[in-house]
Image (cartoon, helix red, strand yellow):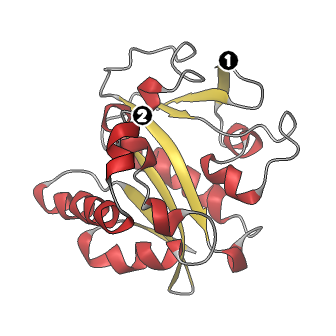
Amino acid sequence: MTIEAATPERFDDVQHTFGAGGNGRGCQCQWWTLTNAQWERTTKEERAELLREETEATRDGHPAPGLIAYVDGEPVGWVRVGPRVMQPRLARTRAFTPVSEHPWDDPQVWAVTCFVVRREHRGEGVASALLQAAVAHAREHGANVVEGYPVDVAESPRARSNDLFRGTLTMFQEAGFRTVGSVKPGSPVVALTA
């Protein structure tokens, strides 16, 4: 397995990861980057264009909006990671806002918010590898803290695979994250000092 930044020449690879499992194709990993009103006004094609623009911005020195996992050269997984301020829906989510230990306008707090793994590669450690790479990516780009918003499957035993796009609590714990709090059962906020 190799993991690469989502740059313009890899945009089609991101789309391939979205093609077999979960809501990636329709969402285009824009859920956290748009307010609810903006989300309601956009189509799948417009969201894809927004993601393309994010990858194009890497040409100007901006960090990639996410990472892609490859198994034997095939793109099989995706993780969104970036400054929390670039994902404004997080600051509007009541399950998260009272719990974070850091101001919501702090650009050095990064967030890992979305995982997509193709069905045929689930259970192979792809998401865990992406999480570790996401932390390294955040550190390389100046993050002081990395937050996550996983699902605690012990508290939400009926969670379906589509509900796990934020990752699982145990996966984050195994990567060294600690729980900083929870407003809603099954939706903790976790953090790791970068």
In the picture of the structure, the residue carrying the numbered disc 1 is 183
Residue sticking out furthest to the left: 60
Q: Is residue 51 above or below residue 103?
A: below
Q: CA distance from mark 1 to mark 2?
A: 17 Å
Q: Residue at x 33, y 76 (%)?
A: 10
Left or right position of 75 against 9:
right
Q: Residue at x 55, y 21 (%)?
A: 94
Residue 61, image x, y percentages: 15, 53
Q: Are marks 1 and 2 in contact (CB under 8 Å)?
A: no
How many residues crowd around disc 2 within 10 Å: few (fewer than 14), some, or many (20 or more)? some
Which amino acid type is marked by label 1? Val
Residue 35 appears anywhere in the view: no
In the picture of the structure, the residue carrying the numbered disc 2 is 89
Instruction: Locate residue 6: give its quadrant.
Output: bottom left
Sequence-wise first label, 1 or 2: 2
Comparing 47 with 123, the one in front is: 47
Residue 30, image x, y percentages: 39, 52
Q: Is residue 44 above or below residue 84?
A: below
Left or right position of 19 against 32:
right
Q: Residue at x 86, y 47 (%)?
A: 158
Left or right position of 16 against 108:
right
Residue 180, image x, y percentages: 64, 19
